[in-house]
Amino acid sequence: MPTRKTMHTFLDELASSSPAPGGGSVAALAGALGSALTSMVCHLTIGKKKYAEVEGDMKKILDQAEHLRALFTALIDRDTEAFNKVMEAYSLPKETDPQKALRAAAVREATKEATLIPLEVMKHCIDGLALAQQVAAKGNVNSVSDAGVSALMLNAALESAALNVRINLNALNDPDFVGWKQEELQSLRSTSALMLEEVEAIVEDKLRKE
């Protein structure tokens, strides 16, 4: 599993000719990094007299950010597992008509699963951006740049996951499923772009005051 490897080993595998881990795992990793930065801003705010009024909020945000970080971390492995299932489905025999039908069904279901995982990453990114916005607005001003990087990482994670959703949808011959997921994908991308702009505006405003 990618998450059980050292950073160097993971990066070596990522750079190799092996197709997994790939972009989907990197998208989830970017989400985990963004959430970890949100947690850091919370830690750097909690316990400071200057921010006593928002300490309760920061503790709640910290719990939520850590929960998201755990979800993203699990999705790093789940994306690799889903890709491997797709490859296994394609490797099934196809000599007879029954075998071809079984293989086609297996490929279809595995590809749908491989589509839903990056879509899940995208949904969690929206939750993470909401937390990044709160720590940018209320957190330790000395860490406002970290809140900004958190938002940038989460948006990058979402856009990266969107590419994985799209390439999997292209491989599916299921108009209803494809149509629903394309609509959901576009909605999530639009929401993320707006949320990122809001966080960047907060960060820019605070940086100008420093």
Image (spheres, rainbow, N blue to C red):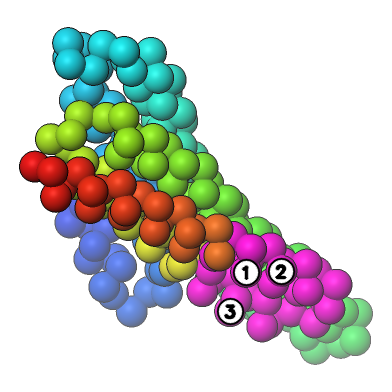
Mark sitting earlier along the chain (3/2): 3
Residue pictured at 20% horizontal, 29% vertical: 140
* Residue bearing the label numbered 1: 186
Q: Residues within 10 Å of mark 2 (few under 14, many from 20)?
A: few
Task: Tell me where residue 124 appears, x and y as whole percent.
Answer: 53, 46
Residue 89 in view in this figure: no
Which residue type carries mark 3?
Ile
Label drawn at residue 140:
none
**Left or right: where 118 falls relative to 148:** right
Instruction: Give the spatial CA distance, label 3 vs label 1.
Output: 14 Å
- Which residue is at the front of the view, 181 or 54? 54
Q: Position of residue 80 (x, y in %)?
A: 48, 60
Outermost residue on the right side: it is: 98
Question: How far apart are the two marked residues, 2 and 1, measured between alpha carbons?
Answer: 5 Å
Query: Which quarter of the figure has residue 137?
Result: top left
Residue 167, numbered label: 3
Pair 3/2: label in front: 2
Which residue lies most toward the left here?
210
Who's the residue at 8% across and 42% down the image?
210
Q: Is residue 210 left or right of residue 182?
A: left
